[in-house]
Amino acid sequence: VYFLNTLGLTLLIPALPSYSNLIGHTMGWISATIWTLLAIPQMLKIHRSKSVAGFSILLVSTIGLGDFMQSIVAILLKLPAQTLFNGLRGILVAVIFLTQFWLYKK
């Protein structure tokens, strides 16, 4: 998925001077969508196995904090909507993972 995203952007390089805003916004939404979809299998695996063994609560907390900071910066600097969406998505994912840690901490 990362390779395809990078390849797509690379192929669009000739069009960047004329359509930089459109390409930037489109790639931002594609990236936000990819990151949203990538978290779902891990959530489902934890839910099915009822176990968080091998999953780092410190990493989840750190990423959640980073996403919170990204959201604040996106609001303060009036960054594109994709940036705010991605930060809020990250916070939601972190909350779900932290809830799973709490539920399946055995």
Image: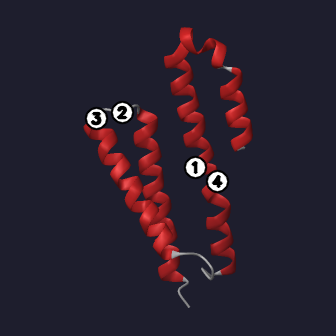
Q: Residue 25 location, x and y as percent? A: 51, 26
Q: Disc 1, disc 4: CB below 8 Å?
A: yes
- Residue at the spot x=49%, y=75% of the render? 57
Residue beneath disc 1: 36
Mark 2 neighbour density, 10 Å: few (under 14) some (14–19) many (20 or more): few
- Residue at the spot x=74%, y=36% of the render? 4
Cα separation between marks 4 and 2: 23 Å
| Quarter of the figure that contains the C terminus | bottom right
Q: How is the image coloured?
A: secondary structure
Q: Residue 82 location, x and y as percent? A: 46, 36
Q: Disc 3, disc 2: CB below 8 Å?
A: yes
Residue beneath disc 3: 77
Location of residue 64 (image quadrant): bottom left
Q: Nearer the viewer, mark 1 or mark 3?
A: 3
Q: Disc 4, disc 2: CB below 8 Å?
A: no
Is the residue 16 above or below the residue 73 in the image?
A: above
Mark 1 neighbour density, 10 Å: few (under 14) some (14–19) many (20 or more): some
Residue beneath disc 4: 38
Q: Disc 1, disc 3: CB below 8 Å?
A: no
Marks 4 and 2, the one that precedes in the sequence? 4
| Quarter of the figure that contains the N terminus | top right
As shown in the figure, which amino acid type bears the numbered disc 2? Leu
Marks 1 and 2, the one that precedes in the sequence? 1
Marks 1 and 3, the one that precedes in the sequence? 1
Residue beneath disc 2: 79
As shown in the figure, which amino acid type bears the numbered disc 3? Leu
Q: Nearer the viewer, mark 1 or mark 2?
A: 2
Marks 4 and 3, the one that precedes in the sequence? 4
Cα separation between marks 3 and 2: 5 Å
